[in-house]
């Protein structure tokens, strides 16, 4: 449904995308996961026919992003990172406007947006500029869906949004996917990776890995430990000053630890920390998450 | 429970309270953004301030920074009264927001000079702080580069240091790590830990629930109220949750 072949794009001297290739199947939910500045927005804007690539080709539903941009615009829905609706129009006026632009009506495609729009319908006369963050997000999604697109592209829809609203948003995306819509969504939150069929880990304009979340995690071969003590800040410093340490990073209530060449066992690590008089010490093996993989992949590149 | 605590409180504990908030109410017309908040923050503490969008976090934070006045309530920040001594408060706090903290079209060095001037540092003091800061952040080589040319993570680390340029007692951080890559995000927290270990009080908001675990204590705001306030461990026990993510979901969705 989406096909990207060797796409590169530079802004002056900055290479935003370096020779990127991937495909998205019909009905698939692909997540582009990476921090600010990784190139996610540039890639999406090329696919949305809003900017031109320097090199490479891309097609959306078989249409070339350069030659057939008019066809593409009719069949894609786009939710840009920055809230881009008319702040001085009401909720209903915004939705009507987008429906009319695409030659349809709210009634015609109401089924598709019903679940989402019904939550903000009680406020339909309110100006879009006066909605809360969560409601703006729902309105933007409704507007992106009103012409029944085949492909939905969402640029960081959950950035800066609280955990509860993020969860609700992903539940909405899952429902849309079940209706056959192909979805490309970007996020800086690694914990959202598990909700995608496949994820592309992107950093500095390159895709470091693209696969299902479970395969990505399985491919991680390092020996990883979770470590905890009564004094977490001292623990970080003690671990980092240990000569055999490769990385020691805070992960929620534990630190995740890897040693050089994976040579340290849990017992040795525990012994070292006991000598440093750490109390309430816990050291155990742990399965990696997407974030561990991402950080490991990052360390392989120049930072 | 709370009354008992107040009764047994000793003089030293009071001295260690760097922020004291009692019955803070803030109304905008008929809308009540903060519904009688009461909490204390201690010296050297990393205090996590969490809540859903629109729960009233920013409103409360702006009041504590002296940028907005409360409708009612007794509040002191750094020992200064929030109604009468806002200028003193501003000299004793640092503030960093995700959206804006440094001037993009000025160099690293120019930004430091600018903020040094705002905070009223002498030239020699500023130069001394600048050298210290650039050495610590390993950013000496980029001091003549424009902020706009730096990666986001660098900017955020720099912004944090700039917010502490005048050696404030308390630093307010409003979503400092949003969108930052996972390694830099953790380096940023290293800076927070270090500052707290040096006696700075850190007041921080975040949407990353793993970061809530790094705080000494966490409050969770729901609909203008503080619905929970304790150490991450105790909150997890209280809500029978595996992690802070679950605590948050239970509270904010009212499942508990």
Image: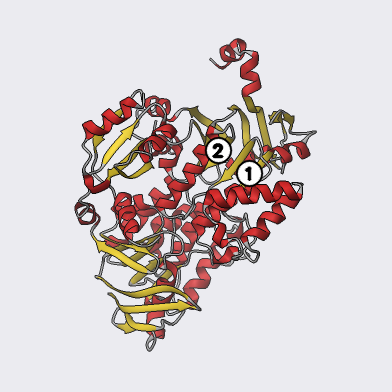
Residue furthest right in the image: B84
Q: Quadrant of residue A9?
A: bottom left
- In the rendered image, residue B102, in percent from the top left (x then y), is placed at 63, 57
Distance of label 2 from label 1 (alpha carbons): 9 Å
Which residue is under mark 2? B195
**Where in the figure is residue A189, as x and y percent of width and height?**
39, 53
Label 2 with label 1: CB-CB less than 8 Å? yes
Front residue of this view, candidates A11 and A97: A11
Image check: A18 left or right of A90? Answer: left
Q: Using residue B98 as the reference point, say whether residue A253 is left or right of it.
A: left
Dot 2 alpha-carbon crowd within 10 angstroms: few under 14, some 14 to 19, many 20 or more: many
The number of numbered badges drawn on the structure is 2
Quarter of the picture containing the N terminus of chain A is bottom left
Residue sitting at x 36%, y 52%: A190
In the image, A49 versus A190, the foreground residue is: A190
Residue A74 seen = no
* Circle 1 Cα neighbour tier, 10 Å, few/some/many (<14 / 14–19 / ≥20): many
Residue B164 image label? 1
Determine the residue positioned at 53% across, 51% down. B137
Q: Quadrant of the C terminus of chain A?
A: bottom left
Which of B189 and A65 lies nearest the eye of the viewer? B189
């Amino acid at each position: 449904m989406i096909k990207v072949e060797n796409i590169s794009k530079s802004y002056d001297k900055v290479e935003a995308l370096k020779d990127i290739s991937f495909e998205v199947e019909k009905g698939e939910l692909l997540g582009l996961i990476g921090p600010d500045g990784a190139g996610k927005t540039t890639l999406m804007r090329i696919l949305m026919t809003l900017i031109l690539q320097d090199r490479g080709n891309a097609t959306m539903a078989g249409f070339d992003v350069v030659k057939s941009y008019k066809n593409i615009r009719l069949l894609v829905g786009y939710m840009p990172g920055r809230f881009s609706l008319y702040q001085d129009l009401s909720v209903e006026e915004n939705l009507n406007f987008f429906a009319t632009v695409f030659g349809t009506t709210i009634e015609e495609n109401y089924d598709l947006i019903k679940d989402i729009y019904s939550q903000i319908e009680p406020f339909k006369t309110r100006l879009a500029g006066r909605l809360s963050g969560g409601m703006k997000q729902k309105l933007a999604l409704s507007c992106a869906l009103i012409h029944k697109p085949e492909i939905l592209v969402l640029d960081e829809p959950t950035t800066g949004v609280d955990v509860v609203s993020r969860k609700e948003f992903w539940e909405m995306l899952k429902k849309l996917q079940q209706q056959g819509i192909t979805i490309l969504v970007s996020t800086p939150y690694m914990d959202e990776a598990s909700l995608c069929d496949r994820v592309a880990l992107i950093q500095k304009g390159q895709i470091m890995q693209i696969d299902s979340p479970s395969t990505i995690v399985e491919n991680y071969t390092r020996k990883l430990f979770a470590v905890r003590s009564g004094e977490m800040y001292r623990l970080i410093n003690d671990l980092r000053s240990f000569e055999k340490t490769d990385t020691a990073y805070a992960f929620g209530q534990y630190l995740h630890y890897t040693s050089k060449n994976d040579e340290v066992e849990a017992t040795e690590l525990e012994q070292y920390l006991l000598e440093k008089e750490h109390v309430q010490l816990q050291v155990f093996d742990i399965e990696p998450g997407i974030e561990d993989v991402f950080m490991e992949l990052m360390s392989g590149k120049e930072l | 429970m709370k009354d008992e605590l107040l009764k047994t409180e000793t003089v030293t504990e009071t001295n260690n309270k760097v922020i004291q908030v009692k019955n803070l109410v803030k109304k905008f017309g008929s809308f009540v953004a903060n519904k009688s908040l009461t909490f204390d923050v201690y010296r050297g503490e990393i205090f996590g301030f969490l809540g859903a969008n629109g729960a009233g976090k920013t409103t409360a934070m702006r009041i504590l920074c002296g940028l907005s006045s409360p409708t009612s309530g007794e509040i002191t920040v750094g020992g200064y009264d929030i109604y009468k001594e806002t200028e003193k408060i501003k000299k004793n706090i640092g503030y960093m927001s995700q959206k804006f903290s440094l001037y993009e079209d000025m160099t690293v060095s120019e930004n430091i000079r600018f903020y040094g001037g705002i905070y009223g540092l002498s030239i020699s003091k500023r130069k001394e702080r600048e050298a210290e800061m650039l050495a610590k952040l390993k950013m000496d080589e980029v001091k003549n580069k424009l902020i706009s040319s730096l990666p986001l993570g660098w900017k955020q680390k720099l912004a944090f240091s700039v917010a502490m340029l005048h050696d404030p007692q308390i630093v307010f951080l409003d979503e400092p790590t949003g969108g930052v890559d996972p390694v830099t995000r953790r380096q940023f927290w290293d800076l927070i830990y270090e500052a707290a270990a040096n006696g700075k009080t850190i007041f921080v908001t975040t949407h990353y629930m793993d970061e809530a675990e790094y705080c000494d204590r966490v409050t969770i705001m729901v609909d203008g109220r503080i619905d929970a306030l304790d150490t991450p461990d105790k909150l997890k026990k209280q809500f029978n949750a595996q992690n802070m993510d679950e605590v948050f979901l239970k509270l904010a969705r009212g499942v508990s």
